[in-house]
Image: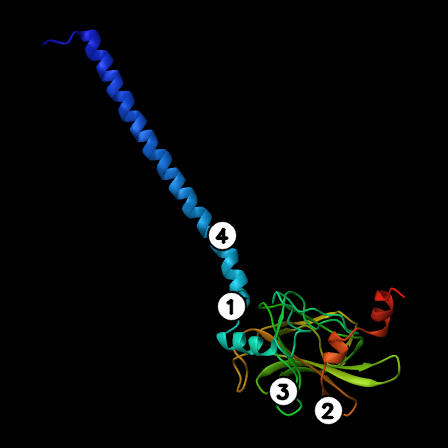
Amino acid sequence: MAIDPVTAKILATAAKQAATSEKGKKAIGGIIIGGVAALLVILAIPVYILSHPLQFLGNLLGIGTSAYGAAEALKTDYDYIIPANNESVIQTGTYPLPIKGNVTVIAEYDADTHPGIDFAAALQSHVIAVADGTVEFSGNADGSNVIQIKHTGEDGRVFYSRYAHLLEIFVHEGEAVTARQVTGSSGGTSGNCPGCAAGVLLHFELRDEDDAAYDPYGDLFEPSEETSEAGSTD
């Protein structure tokens, strides 16, 4: 049975529409599947960050896996330094933190084995003087670039601040510096000298008038009297 030209055209058009519709369905299906996959990837990123905060921070700052364990070990005893979100150090003390940016404490003061606090930070983070003073030493010591500043408190007490594992030094011996002045940058010698920890960090010390190191916690993290009075609701 012969099909007239008009019927043939109708059938061809219908077949074409059916084919186009099928392709459209497949295209829409592909778009949906791709969108779902992309959404899952996007959702997985914050889940990973929340479940592995130290690893994420370490990758961001370039600190080694040994630093993760050190930071984890400090969580219990040093909650005042490493907050729950592990993003940055909380600081409320008399003096400012000696380094700018997001930092994590990876080693605390120990009178027998570690005379200061280590801050893991981004490469070339600005290192600042914690108080007004005069630079007593500026140079390399035991494979590490070091700055030591002599300070005199309002009560006449003499003390020293020491900054080690610096990449750059911006001050010279005998130079007067002011509180929060940028004196150097972090990251140059850490890992390149015997006993140095891996990764970019700042080793910070406070020393008394006899040049004996003491725990910087009180001056960096305990609220000063002015801070306490300002925050009082009495």
Which circle's residue, 2 or 1, is located before the other in the chain? 1
Spot occupied by residue 35 in the image (x, y as percentages of width and height) = 43, 42
- SS class, disc 4: helix
- SS class, disc 1: helix
Which circle's residue, 2 or 3, is located before the other in the chain? 3
Q: Nearer the viewer, residue 45 or 123?
A: 45
Asked whether the residues under the numbered discs 2 and 4 touch, taking CB atoms below 8 Å apart as contact, a structural biologist would say no
Which circle's residue, 2 or 4, is located before the other in the chain? 4
Q: Amino acid at mark 2?
A: Ala
**Which residue has dot 2 on it?**
212
Residue at 82% across, 85% down: 158
Which circle's residue, 3 or 4, is located before the other in the chain? 4
**Which residue has dot 4 on it?**
43
Sort mark 1 into few (<14), some (14-19) or many (20+) by Cα contacts within 10 Å: some
Residue at 38% across, 42% down: 33
- SS class, disc 2: loop
Q: Residue furthest left?
A: 1
- Residue 65 bears which disc, if any? none
Which circle's residue, 3 or 1, is located before the other in the chain? 1
Sort mark 2 into few (<14), some (14-19) or many (20+) by Cα contacts within 10 Å: few
Q: Amino acid at mark 1?
A: Gln
Residue at 22% across, 17% down: 12
- Residue 55 bears which disc, if any? 1
Could you tell me how far apart the alpha carbons at marks 2 and 3 are, in whole angstroms?
Answer: 12 Å
Q: Quadrant of residue 21?
A: top left
- Residue 114 bears which disc, if any? 3
* Quadrant of the rendering where the N terminus is positioned: top left
